Image (cartoon, helix red, strand yellow):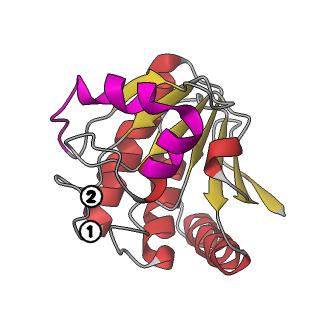
Amino acid sequence: MEVELTLPRGRKLIVRLGDLTEQQVDAIVNPANSLMIMGGGVALAIKQRGGAVIEKEARKYAPVPVGRAVVTTGGQLAAKYVIHAPTMPRPAMRTTVDNVRAAVRAALHTATDLQARTVAFPGMGTGVGRVPIDKAVRAMAEEALQHPHSLPQTIVFVARTPEAFNQFVNAVQTVLKEEAANPS
């Protein structure tokens, strides 16, 4: 299941039901902690599927503040790169929509620097960080809309369950409708 939407500068946003670690994209985004410990949630799934080499490489950059991002190999993942964008300073912390927004902005700029044409995001901060899906995805979509570059050309938001997929689609469509009604 997926829905494709058009963004400015010839880009597109796809909301997809699936597994982030199986996405055929240039880079996937890990909603990391600043210490780069991949012990739970999406980070653990990435490490389990892609290999411990990803965490080993990421840990060399720690600590990485919220609002910055670092890149590692994709290991055994289909994606060539993992962009680690902290949403929280320490593992298993509750996070905020502002941190989600900062992490997404950092990840998009890092993807641009990598010249990645495609990048996939999970629900940033929605698991371990406990940010409600609708609030997190609204922030993610707003950042995707405001991203000033033509790369990445395709941004994929990956929802793990059908219920989350519906929330992702509703949040993204709401942001796009608001943007159309109030262009800046």
What secondary structure prevails in the magenta region?
helix
Q: 1 or 76: which is nearer to us?
A: 76
Q: Are marks 1 and 2 in contact (CB under 8 Å)?
A: yes
Residue 99, labelled with which disc?
A: 2
- The amino acid sitting under disc 2 is Asn
Image quadrant holding the N terminus, namely bottom right
Give the x, y percent position of residue 126.
Answer: 43, 69
Give the x, y percent position of residue 110.
Answer: 41, 28
Q: Is residue 25 left or right of residue 151?
A: right
Residue 50 appears in the figure: yes
State the residue at coordinates (34%, 51%). 39
The segment highlighted magenta reads: 44-65
Residue bearing the label numbered 1: 96
Residue 52, labelled with which disc?
A: none
21 lies above or below 158? above
State the residue at coordinates (74%, 58%). 16
Q: 176 or 135: which is nearer to us?
A: 135
Q: Is residue 123 found inside the magenta-colored segment of the image?
A: no
103 lies above or below 74? below
Disc 2 crowd, CA 10 A, few/some/many (<14, 14-19, 20+) = many
Q: 184 or 29: which is nearer to us?
A: 29
- The amino acid sitting under disc 1 is Thr
Give the x, y percent position of residue 72.
Answer: 42, 23
Q: 12 or 164: which is nearer to us?
A: 164
Quarter of the view holding residue 65:
top left
